[in-house]
Amino acid sequence: MLVLPAVLAVAFLVVPLVALVAGTPWEDFWDRLRTEAVRDALALSAITSLATVGLCVLIGTPLSWVLARVVFPGRALVRALVVVPLVLPPVVAGVALVAALGRTGLIGSWLDESFGYRIPYTTAAVIIAHTFVALPFYVLAVEGVLRSNGARWDDVAATLGAGRWTTFRRVTLPLALPGLIAGCALAWARSLGEFGATITFAGNYPGTTQTLPSLIYSELQGDVEVARTISMVLLLASVLVLAGLRDRWLRVP
Amino acid sequence: MLVLPAVLAVAFLVVPLVALVAGTPWEDFWDRLRTEAVRDALALSAITSLATVGLCVLIGTPLSWVLARVVFPGRALVRALVVVPLVLPPVVAGVALVAALGRTGLIGSWLDESFGYRIPYTTAAVIIAHTFVALPFYVLAVEGVLRSNGARWDDVAATLGAGRWTTFRRVTLPLALPGLIAGCALAWARSLGEFGATITFAGNYPGTTQTLPSLIYSELQGDVEVARTISMVLLLASVLVLAGLRDRWLRVP
Amino acid sequence: MAGGPLDVDVTVPGRVRAAFSAQPGEVVAVLGPNGAGKSTLLHAVAGLHGPVGDIRVGDQRWDGAARTTRALRVRDRRIGLAFQGQLLFPHLSALENVAFGPRRRGASRAAARRLAARWLDRFEIGDLAHRRPHELSGGQAQRVALARALAVEPEVLLLDEPFAGLDVGVALGLRRVLAQHLRDFSGVTLLVTHDALDAATLADRVLVLDRGVIAQYGTTAEVSAQPLTEHVARLAGLNVVQETPTRFVAFSPSVVTVALAEPTDSPRLRWHGVVSTVTRHGSALRIAVATDEGLDLLADLTPEAVAELEIADGAPVWLAVKATAVRRYSPPPGAAVSPPR
Amino acid sequence: MAGGPLDVDVTVPGRVRAAFSAQPGEVVAVLGPNGAGKSTLLHAVAGLHGPVGDIRVGDQRWDGAARTTRALRVRDRRIGLAFQGQLLFPHLSALENVAFGPRRRGASRAAARRLAARWLDRFEIGDLAHRRPHELSGGQAQRVALARALAVEPEVLLLDEPFAGLDVGVALGLRRVLAQHLRDFSGVTLLVTHDALDAATLADRVLVLDRGVIAQYGTTAEVSAQPLTEHVARLAGLNVVQETPTRFVAFSPSVVTVALAEPTDSPRLRWHGVVSTVTRHGSALRIAVATDEGLDLLADLTPEAVAELEIADGAPVWLAVKATAVRRYSPPPGAAVSPPR
Amino acid sequence: SSEEGAGAEAGEKELTVLAAASLTETFTALGEEFEKTHDGVDVTFAFDSSATLAAQAVEGAPADVLATADLRTMDDAVAGGAIDGDPQTFATNVMTLVVPADNPAGISSFADLDKPGVDYVLCVETAPCGVVGAALIADGGITADPASLEVDVKAVLAKVASGEADAGLVYVTDATAAGADVVSIEIPGAETQLLEYPIGVLEQTGDDDLAAEFIELVLSDEGRRVLADAGFGAP
Ligand SMILES: Nc1ncnc2c1ncn2[C@@H]1O[C@H](COP(=O)(O)OP(=O)(O)OP(=O)(O)O)[C@@H](O)[C@H]1O
Ligand SMILES: Nc1ncnc2c1ncn2[C@@H]1O[C@H](COP(=O)(O)OP(=O)(O)OP(=O)(O)O)[C@@H](O)[C@H]1O
Ligand SMILES: [Mg+2]
Ligand SMILES: [Mg+2]
């Protein structure tokens, strides 16, 4: 009853990947990759996706906690708003970012005038775009775990004199670790594959804002073989990283 | 210590949305929406995203359970493989689907020859594409909760004579409900915003395969105002649905 | 840090309503049947039910019924709460569980661990310090939970059935350790227990809860001599009968005579009923009788008498007590009296 | 469905190793100090530790040491396991918790709920049937857990401290209900307890665990008369001293004489030590003495004697026993003997 | 200015060009040519859809030159104040019908699109290629609906090249670039629907002269030759 649909699900997800791998021109695999554009994009993707995960953990974890534990009026609305970037097609997300942080945007124009700082078309813009689309995933996943764990241990910690912050750090977080890891994996993967919002908000310049998916997108317009080859790199990198997640981190004693 | 970054996170996610809303031409809002294309796309998006959530629950829940509870060789690898569609840029995901299920694809060609059934350009293709990209989100989120809940209650159920399936249905699932809901929200949102894989694999024809994001993307090339207006519909719909999630379902007693 | 007197007047709607005071250094045994509200009372004092009324410790106000005073947060009340059911942190070792409180109260990491190790040693589980809760037996976990509550040097100690699940030997030892600790403890202790021995050996006063309200509050001697509820009567090993709403009669099972026929010398105190159980009690046999009036009375007989009368479960018997062998008393005015059943 | 005899020979590495048999209908009290392996033994029989050795119930093999026989899955063993610490399903009401087992064993929804309601009524918590576990008091939850284990009509009953946390009145009633149920029960019952009364009133045999191995296994009368471990001696209210590795001496606290000076009539059995506690015991006072040899001995004295001798905690005393008042015995050959302490 | 662009090194000049995706091969070649004749100049391209690039140009994307695949998007950029001076048309393109190399539906003429069972694809009407395509379909009297309206011409080409569609309408340049993957079939009257490619200097450029020199190269004979090789027509 359970294993059958599970196998079906795996097949459903893996068969297209196999087809993709099978369709990749493996002969000149390395040659196609030995270009500066690929090297730059790979480095940029690695940096920006890790930075994104970091940012998500830094601001997303507290947000999940607030949504799961603190009762305040309008919580349901905030929860909904926070998840919206998830449903926006990436390009629209990019448009929204431009509207907010672009040169003529709400905050962007103020930043430009006051500090002469412009966000678009910089690596920072890439990270911002990635975080904008990845953060909701992280928050939803972590909030789910925090809720299903309940607040019992938080109460116990309070009776022992622990403040909110200590309780969070020493009790709530360790108990929610498996969910946190899942959230990180989600955010990382989402960031690694993102290009719609990135191109719209940060552009597509090799070296500063061209990530692997942007490069793939560009190459799809030109050399499809190269695009497929680069896709393989993404695929392999993610399989390696995700398979490396030790069972130990995915379990609470 | 916790509220500050949480507020920051909310601001980060909400300000671009506000900018987007502010930049929307509200005067002719309804006029722009009163076209057949918008109506069709809205209906199609509703249907396909719900079908996607249904499919995810149906095959994704067992898969999450297997990954969280059943020990088998190569589990880490399967877990990684299952998450890969997450990192593929949507267009590449579409390419993978074409390679597997397209008219000339691995399985698609066999389907075509044996049954004369072609998947591309049908609504079914849209649902398949959506499920392919949304399922990993669902699985990761639900697996995270299942793991952080532990298997203690499963043991108790076994001593009372419950088989795997009953235990799963009556004990494991209800206890993981908050995570399941989070997973559904993730999958639904991802499906609602998806267009890269959809356009590549299923095409873009009004009424059968043109979803809201596809329509938005098409309009972005032409009338940006219309695109923004339709984006508002997506945004509002998702806020309404997600804000409607009652706290009750997000909590285990 | 020396805890002052504890003044409590709290209400947790539908579960408990209680007002009482205790002097510094006093140990108050909280007795009462299951569901009487003992744990709820402790949690309310700890602040886990939010603002619940008036709680004062010395000149510090923990909770105030008036809207103007804000309740002290749980973490700012210096309490040591041993939960019923332990609630050890599953991700921390026994040592880390115990060290958690001292650490939060400002001890250095090393000092907290040393303190925790000392408590575990005192409870004879020093060698299990590195174990996680799921690797401990029930009784071992209970000891860790008790150590965790004691290690924080609180102003008010709240112990919810601290000896539950402990084996006799350990319970004896722990009672000794706890008695010693409580002698030196300057704050108030609330000790929930189902064991008369705990009340007798550890407590200065007894607070009897019944269906959410205080049925009796007095010194241990008072309460055990003149119990007002059937529950305490059982604990004190006495029979208690309520004659009038304000008049109680208490007598020991050893003064009850048992006969098969109706007593002819007609003592005023006599009941007809059916034997429900016969158990050993020291060198005597104790028979429990369910009377026709719905009372549960005990009588102690010699094994020879039991054999002679052929008493067995279900046998109908007459019980009688001489008027001179009973103690009659009234509850003190103002006491919330809940009649035995 | 009638359970046959239970044959067990199991090993859970590092925690318990035990082999014993019990006849259908027998109630085996499992005694032993905290951490002795009582819960582990019950869980092993239930199959929660995976394949652990040989377990047979009647002619059904639940587990086989041989690689060729596959262990019966937990869910296929007809057991009723009341966990220490309850482990009620948090998302189900009390009634649904109890009905869960019967439902899985094939009862219709309505029948399972009726059965569950009957059990809850029998345990006097019928009015709490709709409550979730977190809305129950500790003792109420314990009763639900016990009802859940009994409701499945198992072949083997495994009860882990079933009366823990219950108030005296309820415990008495429940003991009665359980005794009645066990009389009609045709399978084997393993009953873990820390209470001598349970063993005396409910059990046919006693299995004593000590540090993971069986220290003694015999009828209740045998074991309480000739205890081989200090733990059981305490439970039986006896002093036990091991004279030689295979020779034990048991005597009641009431035959011990206490003196301040060394006895001159030199009985062979005498010890010097320090009083550690004085507690009430019936009409007598019971003093516990820690001897210089490291033994813990008990002596019962009249209050007058205690006052006269001016005995208090920490006082040095001499204990003596007349040779005629003790019982000497050896463990049966083959019994795994673990000396008291 | 261009110094804000990607990784400018001291002493080196950099020229950044925003160009329509269909110009990827030709402009890359021209960029290398430009670097050869201009010592110390590094040419960087950002290829994307014309609409996206125009929007980025208006947003102030750090670049020097904008080349789009239709007049409307360039008009948007001009209206947004992003273009310095007047844009110039440097190439034209016409549409053609393409079928997969093995031509599974057996299409031999434009009219065959009306045959039952033929899945053909077009650009969506919001894209430049869609407007032209729809007009050609209407002119040719085709009544069958397309299977899909692709968002850009590359998507149409990909669908045909992979055999997912039996036929599609693309630009001649795309058919040329696809080589042997597809077979072109001429559309009667296609030359009446010319597509014009304009190019212009961006307002935010830091080096007007260099930008103008690049445009000169595109408009030169050398540029014409490269473009013609790829299938582009003369302006
Ligand atoms: N969350 C809740 N909602 C409603 N009623 C509750 C809740 N929790 C407990 N109760 C009820 O409140 C009463 C008091 O419970 P409490 O836990 O204080 O009892 P207790 O005296 O500690 O009993 P025990 O000896 O069994 O531990 C009980 O009748 C219980 O059923
Ligand atoms: N997961 C584990 N890993 C290692 N040791 C364990 C684990 N669980 C329990 N133990 C140890 O095994 C021994 C037996 O535990 P068990 O729970 O069977 O004791 P018990 O006899 O039931 O004690 P109690 O009376 O306290 O309930 C204990 O010493 C305990 O510390
Ligand atoms: Mg309680
Ligand atoms: Mg145990």
Image (cartoon, coloured by chain):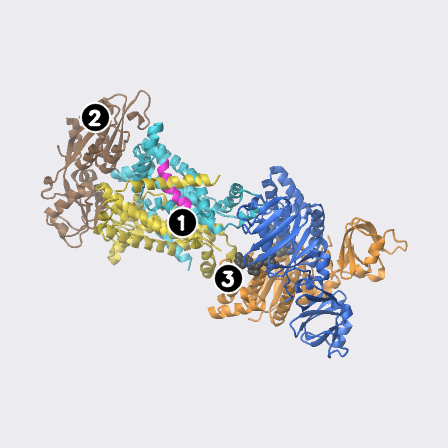
Chain colours: A cyan, B yellow, C blue, D orange, E brown
CA gap between label 3 and label 2 equals 78 Å
Determine which residue is flagged by label 3.
Answer: D93
Magenta segment, prevailing SS (helix, strand or loop): helix
Tell me if residue A137 is in the magenta stretch.
yes
Image: magenta residue range: A127-139
Tell me if residue D251 is in the magenta stretch.
no
The residue mark sitting in front, 3 or 2, is 3
Does residue E1 appear left or right of residue B187 in this picture? Answer: left
Q: Relative to residue B50, is residue C326 depicted above or below? A: below
Q: Circle 2: is it few (<14), some (14-19), or many (20+) Cα within 10 Å?
A: many
CA gap between label 2 and label 1 equals 55 Å
Q: Are marks 2 and 1 in contact (CB under 8 Å)?
A: no
Determine which residue is flagged by label 1.
Answer: A76
Q: Relative to residue B245, is residue E128 depicted above or below? A: above
Q: Is residue D103 visible?
A: yes
Q: Circle 1: is it few (<14), some (14-19), or many (20+) Cα within 10 Å?
A: many
Image quadrant in which you'd find residue C265? bottom right
| Label 1 SS | helix
Q: Disc 1 residue type?
A: Ala
x%, y% of residue E145?
A: 17, 51
Q: Disc 2 residue type?
A: Phe
Does residue A192 appear left or right of residue E92 in this picture? Answer: right
| Label 2 SS | helix
Determine which residue is flagged by label 2.
Answer: E214
